[in-house]
Amino acid sequence: LGAPNEDTALAALPGHRLLRVGQGAKAVALAARGAVLGTAFAVLALIPLRAILSEPIGLAELFRPWSALFLAFVLGALLVSESRGGKARRVWRAAWVQALAGLLGVATLRGPTPLEAGVVLFPLFSGLFGIPSLLIGLKAEPGTIPLQRLEPLRAINRADVRSSIRGTLAGASVSWLPGLSGGAAATLASLHVRKSTGPSQFMVVLGAVSSSTALLSVAVLYMIHRSRSGA
C-alpha cells in the first residue's frame, strides 16, 4: 500500500493518514464514491466541453499562447499550498525542488543528447518515480498496518457533491491543459477542502479527478485531436 510508519504519518498523503488510524476501508470507499460521482458529472460535461474547446468557442486554440503563463500560475499555487501552517521552510524546499525539476527538464530536452524526447523521458521518469520509493523502502523499518475498522459509510451529502464537482473540473483541466497532472489538479481543487473537512473530502476529490480524467482525456482527443493528460 505504500503506507508510512507512525513517525511520518503526519506528513503523508491523506489516504495514508486514514489508514494509520484504522480507516483505510473508509478511504477506499470515499475514493470510489468520488469516482462514481466524477464519472457522472464528466458525462454531463461532455457537450458543453466540446462547445468550449472546439466549435463554436475554440478555447483550446485561443489558450495556446498563454500556456506558459498558466503553468507559472500553477507552480505558484502549488507553492502556496505548501505554506499551510505558516511553515516557510516547506515553501522554500518546494521552490528548490521545482527549480531542480525545471533544470533537469531543460538539460534533458535541450541538451546535447542525440535522442528523441520520448526515448529520453521514459528512463528519466522511471528513475524519478522508482528510485525514491526503493531508497525509502531500504531505509524504513518494516511496519504493521493497524487494525482496520469496517463501518457503514455515511450517506452522500452536499460536501461530497461539491468535492466531486471540483474534482471533475480539475479532471477536465487535466484532459486538455498542458503540463498539468492529476495530482497537481487534485491539490489545487482541494486547497481549502482539507482545511475544513480533513482528508475525507480530499479522497472524494482524488477519486473524481481520476475517473473524470480517464473519461475526458479520450473525449478531448476526439474533440481537438490532441491528448494532454499531464503531457
Image (cartoon, rainbow, N blue to C red):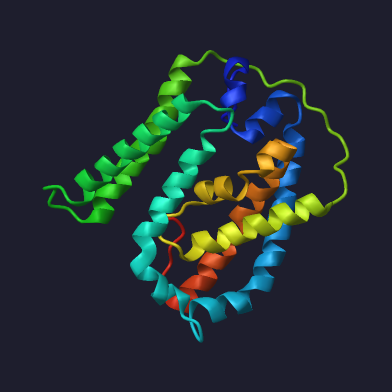
Q: Looking at the image, can residue 231 be seen?
A: no
Residue 202 location, x and y as percent?
A: 67, 43
Q: Looking at the image, can residue 28 be seen?
A: yes
**Residue at 52% across, 33% down:** 83
Residue furthest toward the top? 141
Examine the image and state in which quarter residue 86 appears. Answer: top right
**Residue at 32% across, 48% down:** 122
Q: Quadrant of the N terminus?
A: top right
**Residue at 47% across, 27% down:** 88
Vertical arrangement, residue 108 with respect to residue 219, above or below: above
Examine the image and state in which quarter residue 103 appears. Answer: top left
Vertical arrangement, residue 183 with respect to residue 70, above or below: above
**Residue at 45% across, 54% down:** 180
Residue 204 location, x and y as percent?
A: 70, 48
Q: Quadrant of the C terminus?
A: bottom left
Nearest to the observer: residue 152 or residue 209: 209
Vertical arrangement, residue 92 with respect to residue 113, above or below: above
Examine the image and state in which quarter residue 44 appears. Answer: bottom right
